[in-house]
Amino acid sequence: MKTPLPRWGRLSSALLAAACGLLIAARGHTEEPEDRRGQAGCPVRLESRGRCAEGGDCPVQLRLPPLTMELPQELGRIQEVLKEVQTLKDIVSSLSKSCQDCRLQADDNRDPEGHGDRGDDARVQELESQVHQLSSELRGAKDEIHELHGRLEQLSLVNMNNVENYVDSKMANLTFVVNSLDGKCPSKCPSQEEIQSPPVQHLIYKDCSDYYVIGRRSSETYRVTPDPRNSSFEVYCDMETMGGGWTVLQARLDGSTNFTRTWQDYKTGFGNLRREFWLGNDKIHLLTKSKEMILRIDLEDFNGVKLYALYDQFYVANEFLKYRLHIGSYNGTAGNALHFSKHYNHNLKFFTTPDRDNDRYPSGNCGLYYSSGWWFDACLSANLNGKYYHQKYKGVRNGIFWGTWPGMNQSQPGGYKSSFKQAKMMIRPKHFKPKLGSAHLSRYSLGEP
């Protein structure tokens, strides 16, 4: 009679059969066995271990030989994927640590009583107040710099004029000595006729007064060279008014020339020198830089009234300084419109045109509004470059304007505004002395025409 196998015996047999089959199948996929006799035996061993329990169950252990299996090639990329996953985990960990550090730092800087937001707002307001204060101080410093720059220009101009006058006087003395010695050799000079030259004359005429000095007394166009480093140019010379020698900068006669022009036009000049024109800011700068000049303005209205204004200093800066205007003390009959009041003062103001806003009016361009180029303040008490109107006109006061003219600012019937028939601006050296008769000389000393 056969004794039945216990439960663990039947299980062990099944496990041995499965293990042997798996081993043979695995080895069949890799290589052929060297000894076919080994196929009959199974290297798998099932052994009992320890004492059996009362019910017949005994602990066992299963020993398997080393097992080698070939996997598909696609599974080989698992290792690379695992490396990339590990790298991403390291990055995430680093970022997480950085965030924690940021939160810790924010917690350290936070007001413990919860007043951080109010403190930040107060700090922002304090900084804004400081910025406004600094801006105000900067604007004040800018104005002071402009004023000091103007004074420096005047000092430089005075010093340069003194040097030029000193050189001119020395050259005049030298010319007089040379002319006085001409033909006075102690002994007869054998080559005197060969070396005799024409009388010494000026080779460079800086302005119309130089032509007056050599006897040219007709009012017409002449060529002048205020600065030898720059090209010469033509000007119109008034040789009649107040003794003559005047270089005309601007003339208004009949409205034949449009004065609503660009910055470039006012820079180079425009119009007809024998009719209406603006000489040009670059040329005016050179003329007023070469000598210390005075300015005369002649005005005539449509009622035939003729008045004038005289300023004992007149200088226009270069383009870099926006052709800034410098005028001196006033004398005359037309009134001091260029320095009318604190708020309407054209002295030390920059030149403005419809396309270049350099005035002090904060809400717009005075040149565009009044249709001209001029040394506007904010905006004007004078504008000799305004539109030419025949008789009276209505609307914006953009005509030729001189605010101190008698009755100019009075209201007229129908809202009409007065204009001028003629206007002229001209300059002459401050120390120029025209040759006048006694009656004329007394009037000249009083500044009359």
Image: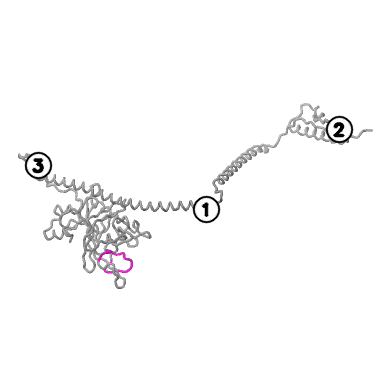
Cα gap from disc 1 to disc 2, whole angstroms? 81 Å
Image location (x, y in percent) of residue 264: 31, 55
Quarter of the image for residue 422 reads: bottom left
Q: Quadrant of the N terminus?
A: top right
Residue type pointed to by label 1: Arg
Q: Can residue 449 be seen at all in this image of the molecule?
A: no
Describe the element under mark 1 as helix, strand or loop.
helix
- Does residue 77 lie above or below 120 as drawn? above
Judging from the image, the colouring scheme is: one colour
- Between circles 2 and 3, the one closer to the viewer is 2
Q: What secondary structure predominates along the stretch shown in magenta?
A: loop
Residue type pointed to by label 2: Cys
Whether label 1 touches label 2, CB < 8 Å:
no
Image location (x, y in percent) of residue 361: 35, 59
Q: Which residues are magenta?
A: 389-405
Residue type pointed to by label 3: Glu
For disc 2, the marked residue is 52
Cα gap from disc 2 to disc 3, whole angstroms? 157 Å
Cα gap from disc 1 to disc 3, whole angstroms? 99 Å
For disc 3, the marked residue is 194
For disc 1, the marked residue is 118
Magenta stretch containing residue 398, yes or no? yes
* Number of the label disc, if any, that sits on residue 159: none
Describe the element under mark 3 as helix, strand or loop.
helix
Describe the element under mark 2 as helix, strand or loop.
loop
- Does residue 184 lie above or below 46 as drawn? below
N-terminal of the two: label 1 or label 2?
Answer: 2
- Between circles 1 and 3, the one closer to the viewer is 1
